[in-house]
């Protein structure tokens, strides 16, 4: 069964802005350019949630995402839910999705979305599941493979984790031949956010499947912060919920879950996956690296 091991962590901002850093170095670090790290068959993606405000924070992050795309040419963007505040009104998609990400859409960057709790009005999110740029194919949960089978992504509807979805997930994970299995969904099963925090009910449903089938990492939003959780049962969990919304001071500084986190700036994650490594960076709107590290697959 695939498990993961963290090889290194390197942070770039000061202790005043980064809470809970473990193994932090104080030198400035930036993600390597495509030229420096070009590797055949690598899968590169961006992950961020709670984006759909149509306000300055979302636009600032979107501009930095364009800069990263032009340098690194990533394959896709994962949207982690709450894609259109306050209630998922599809009439607001042009203002709160198409306009902020105009330059990425012009460049042909595909987005893959999941639904957040703020996306459920107007038919329970049906408009978004059928919105072509979200690539959901009319379904609130789905999977797709990238990199000639290197990575399989499992997009889940954490709003309605019923028996039907769990049966589908069990079968999809069991059938997957990918070296890396990555799940993304809105509500985090581990989080130190004081507003929401860990969803223990969802954890009880999902974690046994993640462990059984060797899911390496999960990406969620909902808490409007960046947080890297200390690995739980061999799985690396990330909260990347500051792509548009930001809840300053929301990280619980007494939490034993946090390996690194930031609740002071909007951010997104850039990730590069190869056969032997999953390398991640958390980036703010100015391009500063908040956190970074490498996971490697291993066997139990």
Image (cartoon, rainbow, N blue to C red):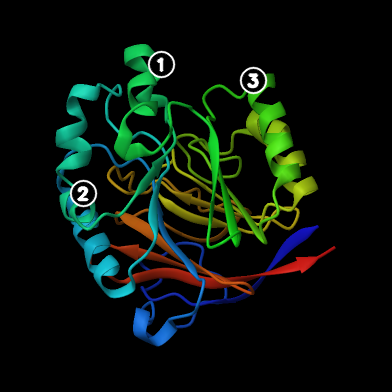
SS type, badge 1: helix
Q: Point out residue 180 in the picture as x, y percentages from the top left corner.
A: 64, 59
Earlier-in-chain disc, 1 versus 3? 1
On screen, residue 136 versus residue 229, left or right, reads left
- Rendered-image quadrant of the N terminus: bottom right
Residue in the image at 33% along x and 72% along y? 72
Disc 2 designates what residue?
101
On screen, residue 53 versus residue 193, left or right, reads left
Q: Is residue 161 visible?
A: yes
Q: Where 28 falls versus 174 (above or below)? A: below
Disc 1 designates what residue?
124
Earlier-in-chain disc, 3 versus 2? 2
C-alpha separation, residue under disc 1 versus residue under disc 3: 15 Å
In the picture as drawn, the residue positioned furthest to the top comes out as 123
> Which numbered marker is on residue 162?
3
In the picture as drawn, the residue positioned furthest to the right comes out as 300
Q: Where 175 falls versus 260 (above or below)? A: above
């Amino acid at each position: 069964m695939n498990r993961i091991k963290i090889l290194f962590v390197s942070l770039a901002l000061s202790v005043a802005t980064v809470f809970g850093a473990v193994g932090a170095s104080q030198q400035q670090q930036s993600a390597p350019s495509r030229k420096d790290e070009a590797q055949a068959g690598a899968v590169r993606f961006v992950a961020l949630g709670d984006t759909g405000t149509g306000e300055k924070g979302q636009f600032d992050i979107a501009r930095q995402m364009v800069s990263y795309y032009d340098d690194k040419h990533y394959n896709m963007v994962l949207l982690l839910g709450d894609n259109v505040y306050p209630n998922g009104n599809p009439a607001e998609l042009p203002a709160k999705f198409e306009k902020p990400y105009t330059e990425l859409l012009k460049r042909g960057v595909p987005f893959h979305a999941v639904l957040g709790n703020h996306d459920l009005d107007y038919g329970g999110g049906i408009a978004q599941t059928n919105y072509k740029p979200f690539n959901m194919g009319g379904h609130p949960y789905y999977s797709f493979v990238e990199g000639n089978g290197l990575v399989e992504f499992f997009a889940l509807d954490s709003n309605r984790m019923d028996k039907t979805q769990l049966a589908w997930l069990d079968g999809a994970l069991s059938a997957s031949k990918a070296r890396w299995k990555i799940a993304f969904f809105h509500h985090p099963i581990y989080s130190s956010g004081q507003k929401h925090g860990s969803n223990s009910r969802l954890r009880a449903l999902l974690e046994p499947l993640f462990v059984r089938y060797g899911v390496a990492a999960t990406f969620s939003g909902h808490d409007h912060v960046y947080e890297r959780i200390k690995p739980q049962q061999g799985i690396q969990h990330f909260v990347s919920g500051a792509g548009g919304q930001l809840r300053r001071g929301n990280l619980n500084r007494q939490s034993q879950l946090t390996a690194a986190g930031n609740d002071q700036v909007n951010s997104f994650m850039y990730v590069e996956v190869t056969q032997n490594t999953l390398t991640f960076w958390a980036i703010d709107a100015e391009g500063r690296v908040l956190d970074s590290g490498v996971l490697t697959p291993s066997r139990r």
